Amino acid sequence: MEETYKEKLKLIQDKVNLLEPRIFLSPTEVMLMVFRHTAAEWSVMSLRKRKKMGNFLQSSEFGKNCNIFSRQLIFNRDHNFCMICGNIFDMDFLNVDHIIPKSKFPNSHPWNLQTLCIDCNKEKSNKILDMIPLFLKGAKFRTEKCFSNGTGSLIKLMNYSYQTKSFNEEEDIFNKIISKYNSWNDVMKYLSIV
Ligand SMILES: [Zn+2]
């Protein structure tokens, strides 16, 4: 791949990493926001619909709201920048992307999520696989800037909202990937022995 393209991706990371967070949130606050939002919807529902919905926390409404909020969090953290083309978009034109593809690593830790515009997400190809360590480093850096009180319950929210499996030692796994490996082949080698 052209060196200039990689340079461009590095510049986008540097630029967004330098921005001050627009919000400082604790994961507990995030969970409360989702809960309040779902409760407000629940309160105006008919009795019949409430009964049909069953357990509040396991309802599709709760899952849907988790999804809406976690999307907003990632977009906010990334300042609505597409991390590939470097343009700023309205939320409707953005997707949450799994940096290490879900098929290889089914985990929605915020460090593995980033903002992409719809077009770049569609065209994301093997061309940029070796940029994964750079993307992971950036996502981790920006997450830590926004969430000063740790990311424990936020990870749960993300896993719930994207219906993916979680790993007990996810932080450790990500730390190892980020600190040790510089190419996609190395990452894959590591993941295959986890
Ligand atoms: Zn883009």
Image: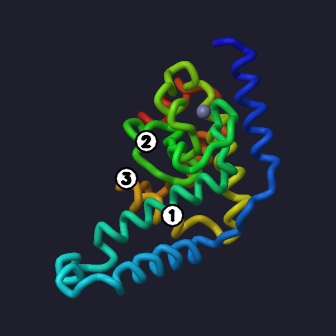
Question: Reading the chain from its start, which is encountered first: label 1 or label 2?
Answer: 1
Residue 145 horizontal side relative to residue 84, left or right: right
Amino acid type for the residue under numbered disc 1: Phe
194 or 120: nearer the viewer:
120
The alpha-carbon separation of the residues under discs 1 and 3 comes to: 16 Å
Q: Nearer the viewer, mark 1 or mark 2?
A: 1
Quarter assignment of residue 168 = bottom left
Q: Can you say whether 17 is above or below 43 in the image?
A: above
Label 1 packing within 10 angstroms: few (<14), some (14-19), many (20+):
many
Q: Nearer the viewer, mark 1 or mark 3?
A: 1
- Quadrant containing the N terminus is top right
Amino acid type for the residue under numbered disc 3: Thr
How far across and how far down the image is residue 138, in percent? 69, 43
Amino acid type for the residue under numbered disc 2: Phe
9 or 79: nearer the viewer:
79
Q: Nearer the viewer, mark 2 or mark 3?
A: 3
The residue that disc 3 covers is: 164
How far across and how far down the image is residue 36, in percent? 47, 81
**Is the CB of mark 2 within 8 Å of ligand 1?**
no
Write down which quadrant ligand 1 falls in.
top right
Quarter assignment of residue 11 = top right
The residue that disc 2 covers is: 105
